[in-house]
Image: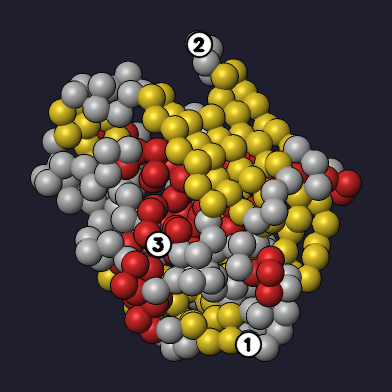
Amino acid sequence: MQTTVASTVSFTGTGLHSGRPARMYVTPAAADHGIWFKRLDVQDRDNLIAAHWASGVSTPLCTLIRNDAGVEVKTIEHIMAALAGCGIHNALIELDGPEVPIMDGSAARFVDGLVKTGVRDLGTPVHVIEVLKPVEYREDDGDHAVWARLEPSDGFEIDFHISFPDKVIGTQHLRLDMSNGNFVRELSDSRTFCRRADVETMHDAGLALGGTYDNAVVVDGDAVLSPGGLRHADEAVRHKMLDALGDLALAGAPLKARYVGHRSGHAMTNKLLRALFAQPDAWRLVECDEALARQLPGVGVRRSDLPMTA
């Protein structure tokens, strides 16, 4: 059945790219509402933005959505992953500014807040987007191909491959199904990361102004510069999978599919969703029964499974 949060839960922090203080409220919503963002600081025009692929704007370093009035919210991927990973289908997310707080760079604190608040059953069936045939989006960045693909699956899986020149990251690959709370246990505490060589470039572009060693993993060659080191030896690929779950939540309903990403990112996942919905014979909506629900994120989530980092 569809769900929402049992009561309002708030989060306070800093915007990763804006560097501004940010406060966010996740509030209950009715069945079939979906996930919407509301800019509380905008009063002169439409301040509601749908968390939907059609609202997505192509950006390389975060997920940004914008409505027809030009009102936008950025860096939504971690809260969207937390909602999807906890099986929450409906919520209104209110913000006092243009960016979701980055917290510790992962989704763990969002998951902790959502699980503590609780989930309310709305008594309305969930409909799932079943992928019927492979759909792929591919680009060539010069030396290497970058691609993402959705394939038919019995549940929901993520398969991700990354490759970076820094020895501490290197080449990493991981495949996980997202059932039985696996997102909470395996991915939720994995933090965003960047290379030290890229920090100055991002700052010059007005990005990552709120980034610190406490809310991102900064690497340089074979060294991890952030205090405490890595939470997982393959934390980088785990975070890319976390991002992918959040970005795929913009499909508008849970996916029954396998997502395969090869060096892909936010913009590519949005383009993949656009490619999927441009092919009516590649997907269909199906009502979710109990057997299918057990194969999707959210079922089996327990607070005791959340890593201690939350």
Q: Give the class, few, some or many, for how many residues have Cα within 10 Å of label 1's Cα (few <14, many ≥20).
A: some
Give the mark nearer the N terminus: 1 vs 3. 1
Residue 293 is left or right of residue 238, and the answer is right
Above or below, comparing residue 102 to residue 304 in the picture: above
Q: Give the CA distance from mark 1 to mark 3.
A: 23 Å
Q: Give the CA distance from mark 2 to mark 3.
A: 35 Å
Q: Which structural element holds mark 3?
A: helix
Image quadrant in which the C terminus is located? bottom left
Q: Nearer the viewer, residue 175 or 122?
A: 175
Could you say which disc has been placed on residue 184 in the image?
A: 3
Q: Which structural element holds mark 2?
A: loop
The image position of residue 233, as x and y in percent, is: 27, 38
Residue beneath the point at 65% across and 27% down: 138
The image position of residue 291, as x and y in percent, is: 68, 69
Q: Nearer the viewer, residue 228 or 280?
A: 228
Residue beneath the point at 47% across and 88% down: 6
Residue 127 is left or right of residue 281, and the answer is left
Q: Quadrant of residue 302?
A: bottom left
Above or below, comparing residue 117 to residue 20 in the picture: below
Could you say which disc has been placed on residue 122 in the image?
A: 1
Q: Which residue is mark 2?
A: 143
Residue beneath the point at 59% across and 76% down: 90
For marks 2 and 3, give the one nearer the viewer: 3
The image position of residue 49, as x and y in percent, is: 58, 65
Q: Which structural element holds mark 1?
A: loop
Q: Amino acid at mark 3?
A: Val
